[in-house]
Amino acid sequence: MMKLFNTIRETRDFAGSLRENGLKIGFVPTMGALHEGHLSLVRKAASENDAVLVSIFVNPIQFNNPEDLKKYPRNLEQDLRLLEPEGCTAVFAPEVSEMYAGEVQKQFDFGPLALVMEGAFRPGHFNGVAVVVDKLFNIALPHRAYFGEKDYQQLQIIKELARMEHPGIEIVACPISREPDGLARSSRNERLTAEMRKAAPYIHLVLEEAINLAGNHTAEEITKFVTYKFESHPLLRLEYFSIANGETLQPVNGKTAPGDRAFIAVFAGEIRLIDNIRLI
Ligand code: AMP
């Protein structure tokens, strides 16, 4: 039977007892409203570890937009039903008051990694992510933690966090899970209007076109092309498009190299969607 914990103490005690018994713990942090993308992480964690802990916590301090936080989809009952058959051992689903009981929050410095793209357009976002993941690592006590390439910049930030604060935890990157029409799966997709849902696969389509151009066009030319593709689109509004190094995430000038990626953020009405793809 899958366990459900609401407190830090019972979750840490449980994780501690798993460790004492020599079991390897795989950990999957989420904000709930689970979909196939999340479940693919849980399955990978289950295949590589003896026990899987999943956290479900909509972390208020990583939201820079209060409306986005208020309207973020929440459905714990359904999440638990989805997790049970996937090999999840225990779920940690705390209240905000349990996670933030008044202590001063850490300030992390991730350098240039956190200054571009999501870091530039969502001030404070990555510090909020790092604060909660740092806490969750101290509660779930994992050997391995699983993160999706859907949030590629977040994945790089977490790798840096692990290097600095949790060198014993292996960070495992998981590929982007997409809908059949190419749209990257996201809890926020639930909030798209029917019209915007129909339009949204255009984002992935344009990224695929960027791959095709990468062979004989510079980063600047590809960026110009993508900008034009969105200027001429009636519904979707481009926030940024960037071709960046897959590790440092710093923008590429001129010709692209193996490992470079294209990153994009787009507004579909009120809903902000992100995606990324490896160029070659
Ligand atoms: P979230 O609940 O959006 O915070 O996501 C929790 C974890 O699931 C993060 O590591 C995400 O990168 C990952 N994730 C979310 N959507 C996808 C997806 N479509 N494919 C792969 N991983 C995903």
Image (cartoon, grey):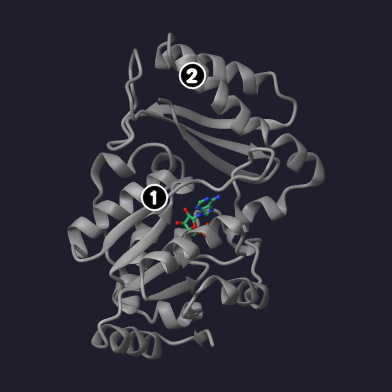
> Residue 90's spot in the image, x, y percent?
47, 81
Q: Secondary structure at mark 2?
A: helix
Residue 17 falls in which quadrant of the image? bottom left
> Residue 226's spot in the image, x, y percent?
56, 20
Tell me the crowding category of disc 2: few under 14, some 14 to 19, or many 20 or more residues within 10 angstroms, Cα based: some
The residue at the point 30 percent across, 75 percent down is 24
Residue 252 falls in which quadrant of the image? top left
Note whether 65 is above or below 15 in the view shown: above
Name the outermost residue toward the top: 216
Asked whether mark 1 and ligand 1 are closer than 8 Å, the reply comes as yes
The residue at the point 26 percent across, 57 percent down is 161
> Residue 3's spot in the image, x, y percent?
50, 86
Asked whether mark 2 and ligand 1 are closer than 8 Å, the reply comes as no
Q: Secondary structure at mark 1?
A: helix
- Disc sitting over residue 154 in the figure: 1
Residue type, numbered disc 2: Thr
Residue 244 falls in which quadrant of the image? top left
Name the outermost residue toward the front: 47
Q: Nearer the viewer, residue 220 or 52?
A: 52
The residue at the point 63 percent across, 19 percent down is 229
The residue at the point 67 percent across, 30 percent down is 202
Is residue 84 at least partly visible in the picture?
A: yes
- Find the distance from the CA under tag 2 to the CA under tag 1: 22 Å
Note whether 150 is above or below 66 in the view shown: above
Is residue 124 at least partly visible in the picture?
A: no
Q: Nearer the viewer, residue 166 or 236?
A: 166
Q: Say if mark 2 contacts mark 1, CB within 8 Å.
A: no
- Disc sitting over residue 223 in the figure: 2
Residue type, numbered disc 1: Gln
